[in-house]
Amino acid sequence: MYYDLHIHSALSPCAGDEMTPGNVCAMAALKDLGIIAVTDHNSAGNLRAFSKVCRAKGILLLPGIEVCTSEEVHVLAYFPTVSQAERMGDWCRQQLMGQKNKPDFFGRQRLLDWEDRVTGEEDALLIGALAADLNQVCGIVRALDGVPVPAHVYRSYGLMKVLGFFPPEAGFRAAEAGRDERLPEGMTALCSSDAHELGAIAEPEQKLPLKTRSAQSVLALLRDGIP
Ligand SMILES: [Zn+2]
Ligand SMILES: [Zn+2]
């Protein structure tokens, strides 16, 4: 099943206004993606709408959040259900540094319903580091039955770029990397788009060897790696 496990919605200030549930899911369907993850910065605010539209389109949604740790490392947190992701989102909100969004400068942070109607705007600035460090973030994600996966490890805000190594105690078995980038031995590479605009959503090129079509089986692969 083709996947793209790193897509931003219009809730991320840096993403285009066209990144609505309807548009993203239509593009994913057009590209024959069977599974997508919507991973806004430090928030789960649009996941419920995406979940409804994905279900209607026959796409499996893996609920996610792209968390920025206090070290300024981006970690993708994936969950079995939207409710668990929302609990993570609530926790992230408490850990944000209290800065307000300046829409004219950072971009709008749109909350949307499943019919692409704007239901509100998030006023806390979602980009930026949380007060919690990498270990704390991974601990909370796992306590909510989720799996933390370091994002774009060799690029800005990536684990290798910031820390220079994979901390063994973090227990990562999978990480996001570019197609030509090599991960340490035994680590499973995920190649997703980090799309902030519709055209950037992944082409049908990367597949996950899933036994069953469920969020749980994707999470098992991310947790244990692909043997
Ligand atoms: Zn990132
Ligand atoms: Zn991202």
Image: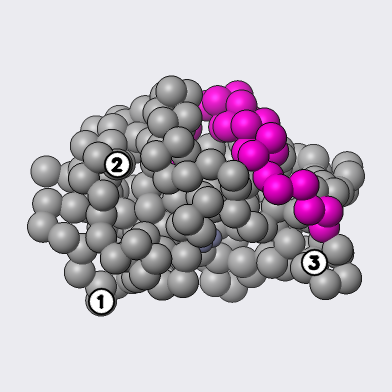
> On residue 220, which mark appears?
none
Residue 44 position in % (x across, y down): 65, 39
Gap between marks 1 and 3 measured at Cα: 31 Å
Secondary structure beneath dot 2 equals helix
> Which residue appears at 83% of the width and 54% of the height?
100
The residue closer to the viewer here, 26 or 111, is: 111
Which three-letter amino acid code belongs to the residue tagged 1? Asp
Sequence-wise first label, 2 or 3: 3
Label 3 residue SS:
loop
Give the magenta part as a residue range: 77-101
Instruction: Please state if 213 lies on the left or on the right of 53 as rendered.
Output: left
Q: Is residue 25 visible?
A: no
Quadrant of the image containing the C terminus: top left
Answer with the quarter of the image where residue 93 lies: top right
Q: Residue at the spot x=83%, y=72% of the render? A: 105
Residue type beneath disc 2: Ala
Q: Residue at x 53, y 51 (%)?
A: 70
Residue that carries the numbered disc 1 in the rendered image: 180
Res 170 label: 2
The image quadrant in which ligand 2 is located: bottom right
How packed mark 3 is, by other alpha carbons closer than 10 Å (few <14, some 14-19, many 20 or more), is: some
Residue 45 within the segment the image draws in magenta: no
**Which residue is rendered at x = 73% and y = 62% of the image?**
13
Distance of label 1 from label 2 (alpha carbons): 24 Å
Is residue 79 visible in this depiction of the protein? yes
Which numbered mark, 1 or 3, is in the foreground of this view?
Answer: 3
Q: Position of residue 134 (x, y in %)?
A: 42, 45
